[in-house]
Every structure is written in structure tokens, then in C-alpha cells.
Amino acid sequence: MTARVLVTGGLGFIGYHLCHSLLESPDVSRLTIVDNLSSTRLDYSDLEDHAEIIIDDMRNVGTGRSFDEIYHLASPVGSVGILKYSGMIAGDIIGLAERAAELAEAGGSRLLYVSSSEVYGRDGSHDEGAPQIVPCRRGARMEYALGKLTAEHVLLNRATARDLDVRIARPFNAMGEWQSARIGFVVPRFFEAALTGRPLTVFGDGTQRRSFCHVSDIVDGITAVHERGQTGHVYNVGNRDNVTTIQDLAETIRTITDSESAISLVDPTELYGPSYIEAFDKIPDVGKVADHTGWSPRLGLQQSLDKVHGHYVNRRATDLVPGAV
Ligand SMILES: NC(=O)c1ccc[n+]([C@@H]2O[C@H](COP(=O)([O-])OP(=O)(O)OC[C@H]3O[C@@H](n4cnc5c(N)ncnc54)[C@H](O)[C@@H]3O)[C@@H](O)[C@H]2O)c1
């Protein structure tokens, strides 16, 4: 049977790549995308002939519409992108998840919720059975993390109480072609600085570690969770082999781009105010998703960064965003 699929937030960074992947699947008969263009600005004209595109808030999609599968990605996103929504981030995330649940319940759809590694709220290597904690830090990032965590609980409780068919993916540090520097993601920030001769600004002392995962692997992982994960389960999706400190990442990108840009350490609160919080070390344990779905990531860090570099080289220089910090 072929499926009618809805992707919320489908014109954002991960959503755009997910939609392209879904369009290649023989199992997808009709793709509908809803996005209010509040975040990443991508040229999505290549999707227009192949999908129904609704430019609107996803809360305006009526429950009269019926889909076999829903991928729910719409959310305020990005360490910088979320700042302007401070005080409304958690409410928004939870409200959007509730709407996705209503659409899924009304249409009998299978729902995939894209949550976040931020829900762990602490340093280190994270598996799905590990405790999540609420650190004594106040700021937009904590509100985002708690919104995502609460949304997970809302959906999982609806799975029990109302037979909602839901699976949850927690991506860890997606990176790749068309990611936006504007909302704070570090890989495009560093590439755009290195390629335009501006300093690569490392937040804090640069020793914080991230494990980056190429967006093609993230998309495959999310799809694997949706297709082969167990209903009512939560899965990390990331690449634990691609760990780097942010300082080392800056140096690697400077080398790849053959750039003479300086690397400077900055206090991000001086740039963005006290609501900005830098993240902890985040490294995924991907044992559960491998066991349940057979998925594991393929692209190493150097290969992933080389792909992004190639993408920038092939883009026109005017695509670079001068002034993005
Ligand atoms: N990029 C990462 O590293 C990462 C890591 C963990 C989780 N995630 C999650 O993955 C999802 C996609 O993130 P992304 O990096 O592609 O970000 P993105 O900002 O590029 O994409 C999000 C999209 O959602 C849309 N959107 C926001 N609110 C909406 C609304 N009310 N109605 C309709 N559309 C709306 C935005 O316009 C945007 O196109 C998000 O849920 C995010 O929390 C991302």
C-alpha cells in the first residue's frame, strides 16, 4: 500500500532533506508539506512540482484532512533562533505536538515526533534509559528542552490513553548542506566565517564536545524509527563516532577551507544577552535504535564536513550570509 504523508516543518533544514528522501520512496503516493517559513529560508522550488505545499501555521491544517503518516518537525529551532520566542517556546512546542496528535488521531495516522537531544539536560553520553535532569540554569535553551520533553510525555501518554500510534526520534547535532547559520548552528557559522575572512567565533572556552551527524544519516534514522521502531518508544538518532570539541571543529573547518580567518573565543551572552545558554557535551548512545531498526549512521565527520564545503563552493558567493555571527 502506498501512503499519503504529511511533513510539518518540511521546508526547514531537516524537513527539506526528509521530503526529498520521501519523494524517492515508492511507498509514498502523496506528500503534503506545511511550513510557516518562520525559520530557515530555503529555495524549495524543486519540491513544488512534486508535493502539495501549504505555507501556513500547521495548527491551521484541518482535522478533516487524512494522512497515513505524519512526520512532525515544525518547531522553534536553533540556539539563537529560539531567543526571540523566549517565554513562548515551550508553549509553542507543546501546542504544535498536540495539534500533530489531533491530526494523527483524527486520521488514524502513524506519527513520528522529532524531539531533541536537548531533553537530557546534562553532560555526556546519553542512552534513552538515562535520567533527564532539569539543571539550575534559566534561559531559552532550557525552555526549549523542557518543551520538547513535555511534548514527548504528552504524546506518549496519548499513546497509552488514546491509542495514538507514535514514535519519537531525538536527533543529536544534525549538520549538512543548506543548514542555516542565521539561527545559530555552528557548522554553517564557521564555514561562512572562514569563507568570507571573518573570525570563527567559538562560544565559551571551546572545550564543549558535540557529536555531529550528517543530515542524510539523520533523515535515514528518523525514517527507520518511523518505519521499524516500536510504537510508544523513544530513540536517539546521531553519530557517536563524530565527536569533536568546538575549538577542534573551528580548526578543522579553517583547514578544509584553507582560510586565514582568526579563531576567537567569545562569551555568547555578550552577543545575545542572558537568555542564551551554551549546550553541554552531547554524545548519543545509538544501541537501541540499531537493535530495533537496524539503522546506524554512515558518514564520518571529515566526509560530512567535506560535503558541506563542496556545497558552499558550488553555491554562489551571494548565498553566504555576511554578518551572521
Ligand atoms: N538541527 C538539529 O541539529 C536538530 C537537533 C535536534 C532536534 N531537531 C529538531 O528537528 C526539527 C527540524 O529542525 P531543523 O534543524 O530542520 O530546523 P528548521 O528551523 O530549519 O526547521 C523547522 C521548520 O519548522 C517551521 N515551523 C516552525 N513553526 C511552525 C509552525 N507553527 N507551523 C508550520 N511550520 C513551522 C519553520 O518555518 C522551519 O521551516 C525541529 O523539531 C528541531 O527541534 C533539530
Image: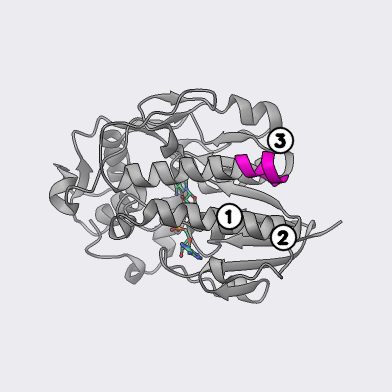
- What residue appears at the point 54 percent right and 27 percent down from the top-left corner? 128
Instruction: Name the secondary structure under disc 2.
Output: helix
94 relative position to 102: left or right: left
- Single out the mark in the foreground, 1 or 2: 2
Q: Quadrant of residue 197?
A: bottom left
Disc 3 residue lies near ligand 1 with CB under 8 A: no
If the image is split into quadrants, where does the N terminus sit? bottom right
Query: Residue tagged by mark 3?
Result: 230
Q: Would residue 11 appear left or right of 254 to someone viewing this image? A: right
Q: Is residue 26 magenta?
A: no
Q: Residue furthest left?
A: 270
Disc 1: CA contacts within 10 A as few (<14), some (14-19) or many (>=20): many
Q: Secondary structure at mark 3?
A: loop
Residue 298 x %, y %: 58, 36
Magenta residue span: 157-166
Q: Position of residue 167 (x, y in %)?
A: 65, 42
Q: Verify CB contact (< 8 Å) between mark 2 and mark 3.
A: no
Quickly name the residue at label 2: 106
Instruction: Name the N-terminal-most of marks 1 and 2.
Output: 1
Q: Position of residue 277 (x, y in %)?
A: 25, 42
Q: Is residue 232 left or right of residue 273?
A: right
Numbered label attached to residue 177: none
- Of the numbered discs 1 and 3, the one sitting upstream in the chain is 1
Magenta span contains residue 158: yes
Residue ID at (25%, 41%): 138
Q: Which residue corresponds to mark 1?
A: 72
